[in-house]
């Protein structure tokens, strides 16, 4: 049996039925969740996660699930790692908090900034810490606009992002995100300096077009957008190396090099949003250089930076930017920051996380097991609703379609991804449904045997869903 009532060695005791109901009700009545769909939430409420160990999570009643999504693309080192818990506890007792403003700091923040400078490619030697990925992207925009202004280019304020991109959920980063499903008609978005170009979705490229021609078309579109706005007005281009929440979209070959080159030529800052792709998910600490062969001006990271054990994000930027913004100027204040920038406990967790990743060579493990995960997921292509299996290493998805030959989607009301994910949940596996997709982004400690378990349950769930639809 896949689903189990065992509890992990962390000492968690399953709750009885009444206690589970009571938590369910408190949550249902009082906790407004991120990305709430009110109709379904009112009806179904929440699955209550209560404990975890390794690559498995346990709900409040003690049922075990293989965590196919690493919490939310973030629990890279797996659950229940004592080293991180101890680092957090030590730091909480030693110095839980002191403000990082102006000219005070703390030991873990200084140590972690230096470690990130060592890990990041080339001249990316400077770090601004934030509370997560959204605030890191938000900070990047302010930093870039500040930089452009300090070099006398005050009109260079526009930023270009991609449709299907996801950069966060502050007002600004929500506007930068171009995933159509996230742009509720009941919300407002910043449009005066935020722009979007096409998604580099190879699977959905125009019928009959080669990948190479598609790449050239995308690069030409970006160039046209920069020139239309005026190169003297465009500050930055933001790109995830592999688009995550927008559908695990690996851009066509050469896309990153060509867009990077274009940005250099037109004096546009290139930002690589590595919130998901960073910290081992693609087999390296940073994918920009080691997977895609580019050196951005700025790298954004969060999630895997602490493996989700503490909230923390970072905007890592180049010597060239630093030289400009830190040049002598009596009014040279960069007035941006958070109470919890460089939080000592979060930074201590980040340091312990990196140490553990290096000691256990988790990047090497991903490079070894990643191709096996891809190969096993590809075996699902014999199922008549599997249209595409794509991704890289531990960042994968399955796209489910009504007709793989035409790539026609199921009608929205079928809710195909959610139906499959619900069967997975019943059978003891968590995958993330996004529209027609099921996302797979497991903890990096996943073994080959756990890959087999994951793919086996996913196959059973797709088959069960096909039966439901007959
Ligand atoms: N950027 C990317 C690529 C992301 O996937 C996310 C979150 O999923 C964010 C930014 C936002 O990060 P956070 O939710 O930590 O604010």
Image (cartoon, grey):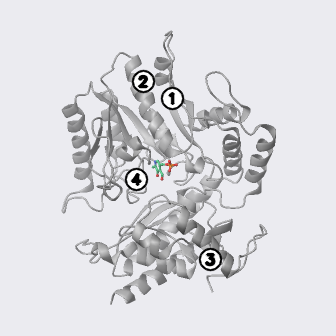
For label 4, the residue is 243
For this view, does 207 lie left or right of residue 258?
A: left
Give the Cα distance between marks 2 and 1. 10 Å
Is label 3 or label 1 in front? 3
Give the Cα distance between marks 1 and 4. 27 Å
For this view, does 318 lie left or right of residue 248?
A: right
| Disc nearer the start of the sequence (3/2) | 3
Give the Cα distance between marks 4 and 3. 37 Å
Q: Would you say the residues marked 2 and 1 are in contact, meaning their CB atoms lie under 8 Å apart?
A: yes
For label 3, the residue is 21
> Residue 142's image quarter?
top left
For this view, does 5 lie left or right of residue 48?
A: right
The answer to whether 426 is drawn above or below residue 359 in the figure is: below
Badge 2 density bin: few <14, some 14–19, many ≥20, Cα 10 Å: many
For label 2, the residue is 146
Q: Does the residue labelled 1 lie within 8 Å of ligand 1?
A: no
| Disc nearer the start of the sequence (4/3) | 3
Q: Would you say the residues marked 2 and 4 are in contact, meaning their CB atoms lie under 8 Å apart?
A: no
């Amino acid at each position: 049996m896949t689903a189990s009532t065992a509890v992990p060695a962390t000492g968690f005791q399953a709750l009885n039925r009444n206690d589970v109901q009571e938590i369910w009700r408190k949550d249902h009545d009082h906790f407004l969740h991120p990305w709430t769909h009110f109709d379904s939430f009112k009806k179904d409420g929440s699955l209550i996660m209560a404990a975890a160990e390794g690559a498995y999570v346990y709900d409040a009643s003690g049922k075990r699930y293989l965590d196919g999504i690493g919490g939310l693309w973030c629990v890279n080192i797996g659950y229940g790692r004592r080293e991180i818990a101890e680092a957090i506890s030590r730091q909480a007792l030693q110095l839980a908090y002191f403000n990082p403003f102006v000219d005070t700091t703390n030991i873990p923040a200084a140590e972690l900034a230096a470690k990130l400078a060592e890990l990041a490619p080339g001249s990316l030697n400077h770090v601004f810490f934030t509370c997560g990925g959204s605030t890191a992207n938000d900070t990047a925009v302010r930093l870039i606009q500040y930089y452009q202004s300090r070099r006398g280019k005050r009109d260079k304020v526009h930023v270009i992002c991609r449709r299907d991109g996801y950069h966060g959920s502050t007002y600004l980063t929500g506007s930068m995100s171009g995933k159509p499903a996230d742009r509720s008609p009941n919300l407002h978005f910043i449009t005066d300096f935020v722009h979007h170009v096409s998604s580099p979705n190879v699977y959905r490229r125009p019928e009959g077009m080669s990948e190479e021609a598609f790449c050239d078309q995308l690069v030409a579109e970006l160039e046209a957008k920069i020139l239309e706005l005026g190169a003297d007005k465009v500050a930055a281009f933001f790109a995830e190396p592999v688009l995550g929440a927008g559908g695990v979209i690996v851009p066509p070959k050469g896309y990153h090099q060509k867009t990077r080159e274009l940005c250099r030529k037109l004096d546009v800052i290139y930002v690589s949003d590595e919130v998901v792709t960073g910290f081992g998910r693609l087999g390296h600490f940073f994918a920009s250089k080691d997977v895609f062969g580019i050196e951005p001006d700025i790298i954004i990271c969060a999630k895997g930076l602490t493996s989700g054990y503490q909230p923390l994000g970072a905007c890592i930027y180049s010597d060239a930017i630093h030289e400009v913004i830190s040049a002598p100027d009596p009014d040279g204040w960069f007035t941006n920051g958070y109470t919890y920038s460089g939080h000592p406990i979060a930074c201590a967790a980040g340091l312990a996380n990196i140490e553990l990743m290096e000691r256990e060579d988790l990047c090497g493990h991903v490079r070894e097991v990643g191709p096996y995960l891809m190969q096993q997921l590809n075996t699902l292509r014999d199922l008549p609703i599997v249209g595409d299996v794509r991704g890289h290493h531990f960042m994968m998805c399955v796209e489910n379609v009504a007709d793989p030959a035409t790539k026609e989607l199921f009608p929205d009301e079928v809710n195909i991804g959610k139906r499959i994910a619900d069967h997975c949940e019943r059978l003891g596996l968590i995958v993330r449904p996004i529209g027609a997709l099921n996302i797979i982004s497991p903890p990096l400690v996943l073994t080959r045997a756990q890959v087999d378990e994951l793919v086996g349950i996913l196959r059973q769930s797709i088959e069960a869903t096909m039966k439901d639809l007959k």
